[in-house]
Amino acid sequence: MTGGYTVGVIGAGAIGQTVAALLAVEPWCSRLLVTSRTAEAAHGLVTDLEDARQLTSGARAFTATRAALGDADALVICPRATFTNTRTADVRMAGLAANAPVIAEWAHTLTGYPGTVVMVTNPVDVLARYFADLSRARRVFGIGSATDTARYRLALAQHHRVPVDTVDGYVIGEHGDSAVICASSTTINGRPATVPLDVVTAELRDRPRRISTGIGRVRNGPSAAVVSALRKLLAVEDGTDVLSVDRDGVWLGIRLQITAGQPTVTPLSLNEREAAQFVAARAKLGAAYRTINREGATSCR
C-alpha cells in the first residue's frame, strides 16, 4: 500500500508541528489527526496545515478527540509536560518525572491500540516502554537512536570530508549520555573507518545544545527521523533503521531491518568497550523505568 494512511499526531508543540508539516506532503499520508493539551493549539495547527494544503495538495488535517485516534494507522506521540530543564548533563532524562504522567494518561486512553506507535517524548527509551506496558500496544518504537545515528554519520563525514552517504555506522543503546557509538563496525565506502571518538562524542552532545540555544527547541532532525521510520513501519518502503524496542524487558536502541512493515533485529558486532557500554545503558534505562513503575504500571516484560 502506497497511500491512504491516517496518522495521529499527539502534541502540537515544536515536534508535533514539524512532524505534521512533513507528513502532510508525504504521498502515502492522506489524513492527519491532531490533538494537543489545549483545543486551541490543535485547532491552530490544523488551520495552519489547511492553509499549506492550498499550495501543496497534501494530506487533509483534522482536530481529533482521543477516541478518534484509535482509528489511525499510526500515532506519533510527542507531548511535553510544562517543566524547566536546568540540567547540563543527562538532559533528556530530566523530563522523566514530568512527562511520565502525560504518557501514562495517553496509554490508558489508547489501551489495546492495534496500530504503529512512534514515541518521541523524552526520555524516549523509558517512555516507549512505559506506553507499551500500560497500553498493551504491540507495535511501539522509540525514535531517539535514529536521530543519534544520523548525527553520528554527519559528524564523521564532516571530519573525514566525505559524502555522508558513504558512511555506514550506528549509534545504539540509550538516546542520551549513555549512547553507544558503534565505531568498531563503522565503514566509509565499505572500508573500516577511523573514528575519533572524542570528536564525534563531543559533537553528538553539543549539536542539540547548539540547536536549542539558537532556536529554542530541537525539532527538524527528530521529526524527519519519525517520517523515515513511518515509511518503513507502514510498509511504504523497506530499509534499515535504529529504533528503541523491547530487548528482554528493557527498551533501547537497536538496529532493525524492516521489510514489508515487519522489523527484525539485526545485531551489530560490538567490541569489548562497546559491549560494556551497552550493558551499562541497559542497566541505566532499567533503573530509570523502575522509578516510575512503582504503582499502577503492569509488570515488566
Image (cartoon, rainbow, N blue to C red):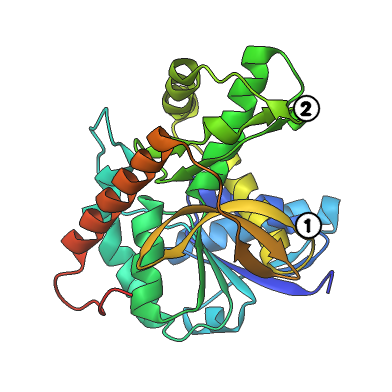
Q: Residue 161: x percent and y percent?
A: 71, 13
Asked whether the viewer can see residue 211, the reply is yes
Q: Is residue 186 left or right of residue 77?
A: right
Please give the label number shown on residue 149: none
Q: Is residue 110 left or right of residue 193?
A: left
In the image, taking residue 31 as reference, residue 195 lies left or right, namely left
| Label 1 secondary element | loop
Could you say which quadrant of the image residue 71 lies in? bottom right
Type of residue at label 2? Answer: Asn
User: In whole angstroms, how far apart are the C-alphas of marks 1 and 2?
Assistant: 30 Å
Measured from the top left, where is residue 69 in percent x and y?
54, 78
Q: Is residue 20 above or below residue 14?
A: below
Q: Amino acid at mark 1?
A: Glu
One can see residue 48 in this view: no
Label ID, residue 26: 1
Residue at 63 percent of width and 66 percent of height: 263
Residue 189 is labelled as 2
Where residue 195 appears, as percent x and y from the top left, is 55, 20
Q: Is residue 231 above or below residue 168?
A: below
Q: Nearer the viewer, mark 1 or mark 2?
A: 2
Q: Quadrant of the N terminus?
A: bottom right
Please state which of residues 233 and 14 is positioned toward the viewer in this rendering.
233
Task: Please identify the quarter of the rendering in which residue 190 is found.
Answer: top right
Label 2 environment density (alpha carbons within 10 Å; few <14, some 14–19, many ≥20): few
